[in-house]
Structure formats: structure tokens, C-alpha cells
Image (spheres, grey):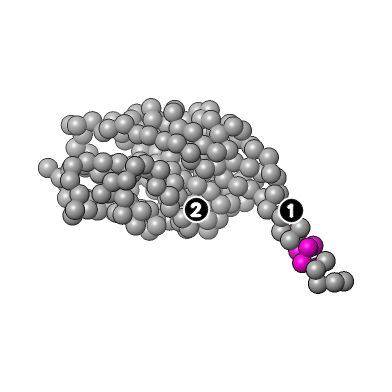
Amino acid sequence: MKIGSTVGLVLAAATAAAQGGWVPPRLATAQVGAAPWNAVSGGIAAYEVSLDETGAVAGARIVQDLPPFGALLGEAIRSWRFEPAREGGRAVASRVLALGLFRPPALLFTAPANPRYRDADAPEEIPWPTAVVVPPYPPNAVGSGKVILETDVSSRGAVTGVRILSGPTAFDGAATDTARQWTFRPAARGRQPVESRAVLVFSFVAPS
């Protein structure tokens, strides 16, 4: 067989494999409203978001609540839009994790020794954090703000990519550096671990 023919067969096989593989959904547009001015607590609220084959949000089930932030995140999710997941080259319905970490108005805020997310009954179709790092309040920042991130999670639960979906702020560097340090229990499809994406919302409140 000629070399050119061999290369062609290899490329064709690679293309077929890519077309037949699983491609998780990608966040296209998202916004989150301002946190209540009198909120003094901090922690995590999270949703399992169901998407239809067009990438529209079909439903959102709360996995971990943190009043009043769970309701705030749930209201925002309704308007989010995704590029649909694909399997075998075809758009399919899917699920994605949307998680908000809300810092209280304190300069130092560390993760608790026994965080609530470790006890949450999260469905296997979405990734779920196993180790969380709290983003620091940047020394050059002023006021409050939110950073919306889309993270790529490998089939082993490692963060392999981070993309900012919100407008530029002084909090972006702290948010992206922190997200890269998180680890997850990977999502599963057909009981097999797969690559996935998680939407992380980091909320920063000016220290009081």
C-alpha cells in the first residue's frame, strides 16, 4: 500500500472516531443578577441543568441550596443558552452542572473542613466537585462582582480548560486561577466516565 493511501485511511479513521464520539454542551450566553446587598453568608449553590437537543434549558433541579443564592442562580439559569451536546455527530439532549460559589463580605474566607457539597446527592450525569478552592478577593479590586466561567472537565475529573463568559473585571485572574485548582468526580454517560463541562459562577463581595 502506498504511503499516501495509508495516511488517507488514518485520517478517515480519525475523522470517523471524532464524529462518533461524545462532545459535551458548550455555554454560549449567560448572565447572573446582583447578589442581595444584605447577604452576609457564603458557600455553594448548584443545579443540574437539563438541555434539549437545541441547547435550550429544559429544566433545572437544585442539587445544593444556599439561600438566598440558590434562588438567584436558578432564576438566572432560565435565560442561559448552550450549544447542544453531540453524539455520533448528532445534536442530543444532555445535562450540565451550574454551580455558584458566593464569597461573604470578608477579606479571608476559607473552605470549611467538612463542606456541604461532599454530602450532596449529585446525579452521575454531571461532574461534581471533590475538592474546592475558594478564590481570594484580589488586592487590586474594588467593590463587588461576578465571574462566569465554563470549565472543561476530563474523564478523570481534572480541569483541563477555563473560559470566561462574563465581561472583563478585576476578579477574572483570581477566578480562573482558582477554577484550575478544582477537582471533580467525572460525569458519566452509560456508566462510563466522559469529558464534560461545568459552569462556575464566582461571586465576590467587597470586604466590610
Residue 41 is situated, as x and y percent measured from the top left of the image, at 22, 39
Q: Nearer the viewer, residue 115 or 4?
A: 4
Give the magenta part as a residue range.
6-10
Horizontally, residue 89 falls left or right of residue 175, namely: right
Q: Is residue 9 magenta?
A: yes
Tell me the CA gap for discs 1 and 2: 23 Å
Residue 93: x percent and y percent? 61, 35
- The answer to whether one can see residue 70 in this image is no
Q: Quadrant of the N terminus?
A: bottom right
Vertically, is 113 above or below 122? below
Residue 126 in the magenta stretch? The answer is no
Q: How many marks?
A: 2
Indicate which disc residue 153 carries: 2
Q: Earlier in the sequence, mark 1 or mark 2?
A: 1
- For disc 1, the neighbor class at 10 Å (few under 14, some 14 to 19, many from 20) is few
Q: Is residue 201 left or right of residue 122?
A: left
Residue that badge 1 annotates: 16
Q: Amino acid at mark 1?
A: Ala
Q: Is residue 162 left or right of residue 93?
A: left
Main secondary-structure element of the magenta-colored stretch: helix
Amino acid beneath label 2: Val
In the current view of this chain or complex, which residue is farthest to the right?
Answer: 1
> Could you tell me which quadrant the C terminus lies in?
top left
Q: Residue at x 26, y 41 (%)?
A: 145
